[in-house]
């Protein structure tokens, strides 16, 4: 078995493209097959310099390895030309010299008459002499596929079942453009044949083009591979996933601090259902359980909240295990904190804040209060069921008790705050709420004990003293 991922270097790797690459990789690994990377760079107008390198780099970041390639279509033009000549010779394709203006006018007329817009075969009626003269005159030309009349094209898709379309509802597709580059429809068929691709796993948007590809396989008398079309990725409003509604490039999610393994785990479920309650899968486990038969037909909603859930789960597990990946994350998160931050303090901050993160770049914003106490209204210090007098008394007791602590450890701090409540006939809200606000300046933050632990004894007492003075 042999599969391929064939992106166009017209931009960064789309999250949908990443899913396609992942499914191809999983399929190849599961079936002891080969995975080929092919760069389809024949659209020279939309080609972006070095986009191919970024795509390859992104795939490597996600651990998606290819066995062969990358192959570039732009380096295979002689191969396509050879097959185009064969199609023309066998009356399966023909030259078209129509100008853009004529084609635009033709389509406008067809739409006005409520007909399917397609080429009217004007150039199919040119004599050999006329064609020869036009080529001699160097008139711009393309090569079109000559569709057979009124023929049903029937094929079996592994996800969508039997698909049937009549050639009368299809267009004489351009196969070779005027710049000498092939269109997708020609190059993809030739490359998949020459590279011995057995299974084509690609997005649902290519399903309507598949009959044209099958016709080309038949015209060349080649074996037709199996087709597996993947459901579209959708926005929550059921429209096609696009950057107008948020990030869509895999690179954007990496930059925000989503972990590659969490992203892969999440997108694996966008269109595939293992039929189990298990949600957390390593790449190895995905390979083991992946099955084309469990790919859904319906479009898959890209839910950022669910991705956040996966990412948070992975971060917390990594922090809990304290292994190699944990050390890598510590290095990675340094950029979100002030330079020259003590390594122990950085680690303490990360341990505390990681349990509240969706993605790593949130650390920059969520840790600001640690390095600079925000300005806050003193009334914030008073718990809703308390009053200024009781709050002031509670803060003064807290200050005195914390000053006595010799071992500034998390467990000691938490126990100390609980003892203050129990020993002074105070409510929990009279202690935990004002101390939280005093040391963070926020209504929502990690627990008071965790913040005290991160800040250290001196800074914690300074902030509590400021709060006491503000209340007075």
Image (cartoon, grey):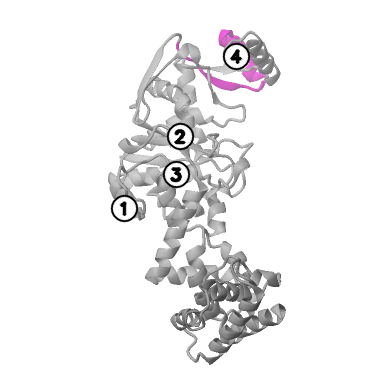
Residue 139 in magenta?
yes
Mark pair 1, 4: CA separation = 59 Å
Quadrant housing residue 142: top right
Residue at disc 1, secondary structure: helix
Q: Residue 299 bears which disc, if any? A: 2
Mark pair 4, 2: CA separation = 46 Å
Mark pair 1, 2: CA separation = 24 Å
Q: Earlier in the sequence, mark 4 or mark 2?
A: 4
Q: Are marks 2 and 3 in contact (CB under 8 Å)?
A: no
Mark pair 4, 3: CA separation = 45 Å
Locate residue 25, reporting x and y percent: 37, 46
| Front: mark 4 or 3 | 3
Locate residue 418, reporting x and y percent: 47, 79
- 421 sits left or right of 325 in the view: right
Locate residue 360, reporting x and y percent: 53, 62
Residue position for label 4: 131
Q: Are marks 1 and 3 in contact (CB under 8 Å)?
A: no
**Within 10 Å of the Cα at label 2, are there few (<14), some (14-19), or many (20+) other Cα atoms?**
some
Task: Give the answer, above or below, for where 10 lies relative to 217.
Answer: below
**Within 10 Å of the Cα at label 3, are there few (<14), some (14-19), or many (20+) other Cα atoms?**
many
Which quarter of the figure is the N terminus placed in? top left
Which residue is rendered at x = 48% and y = 51% of the image? Answer: 307
Q: Which residues are magenta?
A: 120-148
Residue closer to the observer: 241 or 132: 241
Q: Earlier in the sequence, mark 2 or mark 3?
A: 3
Q: Residue 285 bears which disc, if any? A: 1
Quadrant housing residue 451: bottom right
Residue position for label 3: 19
Residue at disc 3, secondary structure: helix
Quadrant housing residue 47: top right
């Amino acid at each position: 078995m042999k599969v391929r991922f064939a992106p166009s270097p017209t931009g960064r790797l789309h999250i949908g493209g990443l899913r396609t690459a992942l499914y191809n990789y999983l399929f190849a690994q599961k079936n002891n097959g080969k995975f080929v990377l092919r760069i389809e760079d024949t659209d020279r107008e939309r080609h972006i310099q070095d986009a191919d390198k970024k795509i390859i780099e992104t795939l490597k970041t996600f651990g998606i390895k290819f066995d062969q390639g990358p192959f570039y279509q732009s380096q295979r033009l002689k191969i396509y030309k050879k097959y185009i000549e064969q199609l023309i010779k066998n009356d399966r394709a023909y030259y078209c010299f129509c100008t853009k203006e004529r084609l635009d006018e033709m389509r406008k007329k067809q739409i006005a008459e409520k007909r399917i817009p397609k080429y009217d075969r004007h150039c199919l009626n040119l004599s050999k002499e006329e064609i020869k003269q036009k080529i001699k005159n160097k008139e711009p030309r393309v090569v079109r596929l000559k569709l057979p009349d009124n023929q049903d094209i029937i094929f079996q898709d592994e996800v969508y079942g039997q698909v049937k379309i009549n050639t009368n509802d299809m267009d004489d597709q351009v196969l070779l453009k005027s710049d000498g580059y092939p269109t997708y429809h020609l190059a993809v068929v030739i490359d998949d044949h020459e590279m011995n691709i057995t299974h084509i796993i690609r997005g649902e948007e290519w399903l309507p083009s598949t009959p044209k590809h099958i016709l080309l396989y038949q015209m060349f008398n080649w074996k037709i591979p199996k087709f597996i079309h993947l459901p579209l990725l959708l926005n929550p409003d059921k429209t096609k996933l696009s950057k107008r509604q948020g990030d869509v490039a895999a690179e954007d999610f990496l930059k925000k601090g989503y972990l590659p393994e969490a992203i892969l785990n999440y997108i694996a479920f966008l269109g595939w259902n293992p039929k189990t309650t298990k949600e957390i899968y390593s790449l190895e486990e995905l390979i083991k359980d992946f099955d084309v038969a469990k790919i859904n037909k319906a479009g898959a909603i890209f839910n950022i909240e669910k991705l956040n859930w996966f990412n948070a789960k992975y971060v917390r597990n990594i922090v809990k295990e304290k292994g190699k990946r944990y050390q890598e994350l510590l290095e990675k998160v340094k950029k979100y904190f002030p330079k020259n931050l003590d390594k122990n303090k950085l680690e303490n901050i990360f341990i505390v804040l990681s349990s509240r993160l969706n993605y790593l770049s949130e650390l920059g914003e969520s840790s600001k209060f640690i390095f600079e106490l925000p300005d806050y209204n003193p009334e914030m210090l008073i718990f809703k069921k308390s009053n200024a007098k009781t709050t002031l008394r509670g803060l003064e007791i807290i200050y005195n008790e914390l000053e006595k602590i010799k071992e500034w450890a998390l467990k000691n701090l938490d126990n100390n705050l609980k003892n203050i409540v129990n020993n002074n006939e105070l409510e929990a809200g009279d202690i935990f709420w004002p101390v939280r606000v005093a040391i963070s300046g926020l209504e929502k933050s990690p627990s008071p004990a965790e913040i005290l632990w991160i800040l250290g004894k001196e800074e914690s007492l300074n902030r509590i003293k400021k709060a006491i003075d503000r209340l007075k």
